Image (spheres, rainbow, N blue to C red):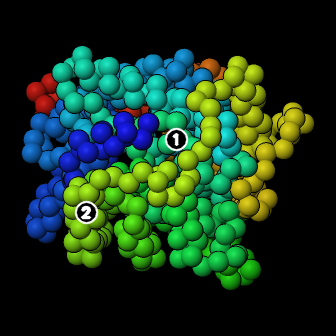
Amino acid sequence: MESEFIQRAKALSALGAGLSVDVYSPDLLQLVDALDEAELHPGYLEVFKATTSAMHWVRRRLPDMPLTYHGEGLWTTQPDFPQSNSGRQGVAEACAQLAALRSAWLNHECATKQMVGYAFGTYLPPLYTEWSATMTAENVTFLQAQVDTQAQQDGIDPALVLLEMPPLTYFGCGSLAIPRFFRQVTELSACGLVLDIGHLWTVYRYTGAWRRQTVESFVAEFLDEFPMERVIEIHVAGLAEFQTSVNRVTAADARDRPYWIDAHGASIPALLFDLLAQVLAHPRLRSLKGVALEVDTKPIATIVEEYGRFVTRFERSITEVQRIGHAGSLPSRRAETGYGLDVRKTLTADERSALHHQYQWYVHRVTACDPQSIEGELSLLGGSPEDLSRYRDCYLPHELLHWGGELQDMFPKTCGLLAEAGVPLEQFVSAWFSRPRPEQDDYDFFLLKIDRFVEFVEQWCPKAAQRVGDEARELRDAYRAANEPIGSVGERV
């Protein structure tokens, strides 16, 4: 696995400082124009999944710009990935978008928004256990094989699959330290890694490490154990506190570290740039090909200002890290750290079944939809039960009621009828997690939310069934038009 990774990594070009962007939010061409006006020229753009036709359009409009791909909907942490819609339709679409962009890599969070039949609006990290690491490695190897096969058929160079260390939104579950989880994955697969600096901070915050040590000493220990020689890309994005009327910061909270979570639309704290400098100085960071600010959903003026500060401070050091890595041989984890693991390449049938049940327990634990059905305890990664409760009681309901579309705005007339009937919108949360539902289509949280709300209204307020159906059709039509603004000749409609 190590030699295969080294061969693939050496074939990748060093791209330098870049941006991870969305096609639509903000408008990609307006962003590029604003950067040009400021005489800022990113070494590459990493484009988040959209439609395949949109990716072809981006490539035509930016013919000379190196473009890489940030995938979505490929749930490689899940036991059924190869047989699932995610592993079939999702992989096929990812391969088509890789080819459209001519991307050197496929980056995807090592996390999921869909788990054993239950869907979430934002990523949940995997179970950090040995079985989960082995299963993730199997699935990443399967994904890489599909990418390689399709690239050979298309007559193009295959993209390298990268796993991104995910954030902790208040909690993480499992028995394995996060650096060890990724070392086990890389012992069993030839994938590369993406190290997100903000995600690293959330590990510091929500595993309770902040109570024992400074963030600098935590990062030093974390990086020494993490497979840094596999890091192809580094991300830096904003962090922000999530606040609602039921999530007020107390005086005690204010004395602690802030409740920051990953937030691409927010400003990047100065602390993260300081941590980036620490990461770039690590001696085993020798496969690095790019460092990108994640700026989707951020105002263009803010992006230009932050990117200017970023390249002024880091462009030279990024270039130097890449020069050293290109000039020398890539280090072996076994030789330099002694962290070679004695792990099996596959799980037994019984272990696969047990892991599937553990993910069922995971869903029950984080949603508390049916506490009596929890058959075993899944330990937190050193964090506090209060942090899990913060996710379960505050953040998760906000995902379903407000995030990705405000229900009151999406279905104004239907919500009025629900209020008249005395049906609280909060009841939608328990209905959402009342039972598992098999995957049927490519994951899209907005469309999924529409479908589930229609089901909810038909069950709990039948007199509003006609109204919710009409509003749902209008939403779907408008959403399709908004997400495919590419004309037949490659121009905006």
Near mark 2 (Cα within 10 A), the count class, few <14, some 14-19 or many ≥20, is some
Query: 301 above or below 167?
Result: below
Q: Position of residue 28 (x, y in %)?
A: 23, 49
Q: Tell me the number on the disc at residue 142.
A: none
Query: Considering the image in quadrants, where does the C terminus appear?
Result: top left
Q: Position of residue 204 (x, y in %)?
A: 60, 67
Q: Amino acid at mark 2?
A: Ile
Q: Secondary structure at mark 1?
A: helix
In the shown orientation, is residue 413 left or right of residue 276?
right
Residue at horizontal 79 percent and vertical 45 percent from the top: 378
* Label 1 sits on residue: 187
Query: Considering the image in quadrants, where does the N terminus appear?
Result: top left
For this rendering, which residue is in front, 85 or 478? 85
Query: 348 above or below 69?
Result: above
In the shown orientation, is residue 339 left or right of residue 289?
right
Q: Quadrant of residue 81?
A: top right
Residue at horizontal 46 percent and vertical 25 percent from the top: 142
Q: Amino acid at mark 1?
A: Glu
Q: Secondary structure at mark 2?
A: helix
Query: 313 above or below 221?
Result: below
Q: Tell me the number on the disc at residue 324.
A: 2
The answer to whether residue 401 shows anywhere in this view is no
Residue at horizontal 87 percent and vertical 35 percent from the top: 375
The alpha-carbon separation of the residues under discs 1 and 2 comes to 24 Å
The answer to whether residue 370 shows anywhere in this view is yes
